Image: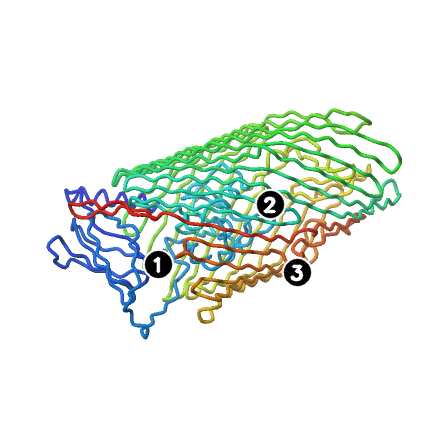
Amino acid sequence: MKRILLLLVYSVALLAAGRSSAQSVRGRVVDQARQPIVGVAIVMLDADSTYVAAAASDADGRFSIQSAVRPYRLLFQHLAYEMQTLASDCDDTGETELHESANSLEAVVVEGEKPIVRVEQGRLAYDLEAVSKGKAVNNAYEALAKLPGVSEQDGTLTLAGAGSVAVILNGKPTTMSAEQLVSLLRSTPVDRIEKAEVMYSAPPQYHVRGAAINLVLRRGSEHAFSGEVHGNYTNRFYSNWDAGGNIVFTAPKWSAEATYSTGQVKAKRIIDLNSQHTLAGRLHEIIQNQNITNEATWHQLRAAAEYAPEGKGRLSAAYTASFTPRNDGLSRANGSLVNSVSSPRGDNAMHNASLRYTPVSGPDLSLDYTRYSSTQSAAMQNRYADGSETAFDVLSGQTVDRISFSLNQAHGVGKGWELTYGGVFGWAGDHDYQHYTFREGGTAAENTDSHLDEYTANLYAGFSKQFSKGSFSFSAAGEYYRLGGYDNWSLYPQATLLWTPAEGHLLQFSLSSDKTYPSYWEMQEATSYIDGYSEIRGTPGLRPSKSYSGQALYMYKQKYIFMLFWNEMPDYFIQTAWQAPDRLALVYQTLNWNTNRQWGANVILPLRIGKWLDTRLTLTGLRMTQRCDTFHDMAFDRSKWLGRGELDNTIRLIRKPDLTLELSGHYQTAAIQGTYDVDASWSVNAGAKWTFDKGRATLSVRCNDIFEHSLPFAKVRYRGQYLDMDSGAYTRSVTVHFAYRFGSYKEKKHRKVDTSRFGH
């Protein structure tokens, strides 16, 4: 919304001046490795070489000079670099590269620590490149996990003090699923991200509630061409590989990019079960070993284009697709009750198209459509200890169409006040089916074939106030939701207060509310079989989960973070296991709980020692309470204290060539999850990264979970339920990554004469 307001003010200023000349010149200064240079003096001269104005580059290498003079000349001056001259009539000069001076004074050393975070209109804007610099980070997703307070748990990003966090691109959510978005981010180079905006309470114009991270993609305004190719080899019991590339074209009025990656993955999972199952007063000791392998080939594609003539708004379009044409598996279970073999295979495809128009004035409009389809077949055979056998084939599939339309509007009403309002309207259609064909014996499974229609209508209004030492925002969104025979009206308040009482001190108070929806498949009345003992059962009527959270954050010197937090989640849902009372079956099912409550404190302490060591310590302590009155026939109300510590170290061994080491680890005390008791877990990770060829090439090696203790041992000892589950095998992985950047091919405008294009 800031962009819309700036464009609106800009257009009014043009009308008042009666001319089309711009009022400022901006750009960025970098060295030959494309790293920002701080403290460069930029002097502006007019066509007659008369002094006009001057500025200095900031910690990110950026500068801005307020002037309407066109054409102009810029002089770039720095003690350690050769003087550079640029003649142009553009508002944005793009990146200007300076070369080290051969006669620089080695005795003069100017050192500074580049801030990785800035406060921008109530948001914490992180420089993702600075956060991940020197670390064994290979893509945007891995860089996100390096943000202060952000961690990855079971393939999901979480934000300390806020729980789960939504990731959006360029201020706009997508109808892609979380897994599909993660796949896209894993194929996106870090340098394609201009900044990551962390919000503990996202404003309603982002159309996500609760905590969110907005990734702002870089936009260029000069003629340029750049790209990257990369390849990975990973070993986690089996060898895997992936490769891909990214190319970007930019011009003053338009830009286009394309990303493609492909790979093959094969994974193994071992689960050891010890189930003391009581049936009809008799205790059955069931020991099962589940050996599950899966092999898949995948493709990921994204193409985007943007047209943005100066002063005439911005039109952008993007297409994202992912394909898994081969997804084969083999599941073997051997034990005291049954020996099972299952061989599932299938394929899936996802297509997403989005269109967005941001005018100079008027509402921001966007349209997003996603289609997802999958089919899977499996043949299962069970041989029980009593001599009986069952065999059947199962064919299942899913087709989902989702479309959403949103509009946002903002008005500046004077004295730092801004009014925002808008809405989003969405529809989704889901078709799920599962058909069984029995070849031997029988089972209680039934065929299913269902259609679900989901409707969402959301309207919001809010206001914000910018003042000299901070900002305040408040909004409320009303939402109508309908799925099948379930409909619900909800009100979601949001508020954020940010205050900087003195330089180096920042206080932020956030309040947010949210709703999380279960997957379509979880709401189907269907049963899937892992083996002859373990099964997954759907839950018709599963309700969305609400969430209310609050945070009080204090940041000192843009580095040290201290936080108190509270989260309350009524109707929380999660998949847990229980031993069926009427037959020998371990049933995994997703159910709604009364609540899942967490409150506690979080501390993030970075430390830098000289030029060779960067350390960050994250400590979290919380009290968790979980209650469910309708958990089958055994209600629970349990509480436990939990502690977690993370230590990240980056060690720079050599600067030329640039060689760094990374060593990190985490420890979490014992926890609970419903009726589960979860043991303590810990992991140690190590990596090395070599950057060479003037920053264009990187080679990294990383080993995660060296000692294989990241997946904890879980057990159930609750009201007659007795279960041990160990799934901690084969969690260690070793990855070798190579990437090469190319391009920096630019055309810079000079007075009366256009230069030719340069590149390598």
Q: Residue drawn 63% across and 31% down? A: 346
* Amino acid, disc 3: Thr
Of labels 1 and 3, earlier in sequence is 1
Answer whether labels 1 and 3 touch (C-beta < 8 Å): no
Residue found at x 47% / y 37% = 301
Label 2 is placed on what type of residue? Asn
User: x, y percentage for residue 619?
Assistant: 56, 63
Left of 300 or right of it: where is 637? right
Q: Secondary structure at mark 3?
A: loop
Which residue, given by chain and number where applicable, does mark 2 sit on?
A: 240
Q: Residues within 10 Å of mark 1 (few under 14, many from 20)?
A: many
Point out residue 699 in the picture as x, y percentages from the top left corner: 49, 55
Seen from the viewer's position, the closer of residues 372 and 492 is 372
Query: Given this view, does label 1 or label 3 mark the residue nearer the observer?
Result: 1
The image shows residue 720 at horizontal and vertical percentages of 81, 48
Quarter of the view holding residue 366: top left
> Which label lies toward us, 3 or 2?
2
Relative placement, left or right, of 257 versus 642 is left
- The Cα–Cα distance between marks 3 and 2, rounded to whole angstroms, is 32 Å
Q: What mark, if any, has residue 36 been given in the picture?
A: 1
Q: Position of residue 170 (x, y in %)?
A: 40, 44
